Amino acid sequence: ETGVTQSPTHLIKTRGQQVTLRCSSQSGHNTVSWYQQALGQGPQFIFQYYREEENGRGNFPPRFSGLQFPNYSSELNVNALELDDSALYLCASSKSVTMNYGYTFGSGTRLTVV
Amino acid sequence: AQSVTQPDIHITVSEGASLELRCNYSYGATPYLFWYVQSPGQGLQLLLKYFSGDTLVQGIKGFEAEFKRSQSSFNLRKPSVHWSDAAEYFCAVGLDYGGSQGNLIFGKGTKLSVKP
């Protein structure tokens, strides 16, 4: 079975621009979460999508938004990029909206904002 | 507020020696608990998880962890470390209610170095 794949792997953007990151969930998984991992820190929860709707959100401003598609793939959109948005963005998928099955993480997208 | 503390930022052990990585959490109810490992530039790989039942949990790569409710701890152990275990290890608590569904709260991680 394929795991979680994210694209692109690396990205450089200018402050104020917008960016879209993509995630294909593992086969059989219907729930997708996004995390931001700053250098030297643990990942921080951005939001979770289930049945194409956001059903959980962390402490991130509205300029962080997302989508989930009928095939369970997902996008993370960030508007008005700030220098502090530079981080590794991780996508995680799960078989269920509950936590019993744990989460499978992708390798991430490294975003650099200059 | 819920939180996860990993007191050791960096640990160095000799190959073949035993390992224990500490994790303490703050959470009102019985938590979902996870240990993940991250190699440089990579995503997170699940080592093991605890939800209920036997408090000693076996994971992949020879790792185990013990849930101790009285100490709010979930320490990760391995009896004999291999050079390939060098990586960063993250403990996480899972929140699964209301608007926080899907929220894993991670500690800041412990970097493990292995001496030959």
Image (spheres, coloured by chain):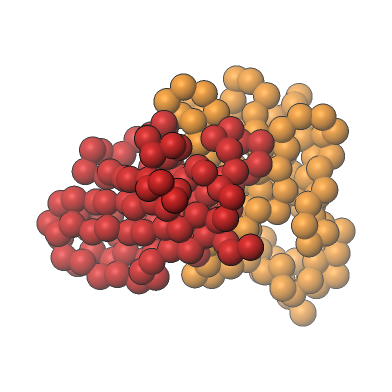
Chain colours: A red, B orange
Q: Position of residue B113 (x, y in %)?
A: 66, 69
| Residue A17: quadrant of the picture | bottom left
Residue at 78%, 45% in the rendered image = B65
| Residue most extreme to the front | A70
Residue A109 percent across, percent down from the top left: 39, 64
Q: Quadrant of residue A2?
A: bottom right
| A92 lies left or right of B67 | left
Report x, y in % for residue B7: 61, 46
As drawn, B10 above or below A63: below
Number of callouts: 0
Q: Nearer the viewer, residue B22 or A54?
A: A54
> Which x, y percent locates residue B55?
82, 34
Tell me which residue sits at (27%, 51%) in the image.
A77
Q: Quadrant of the N terminus of chain A?
A: bottom right
Residue sitting at x 29%, y 69%: A11
Most extreme residue toward the bottom is B116
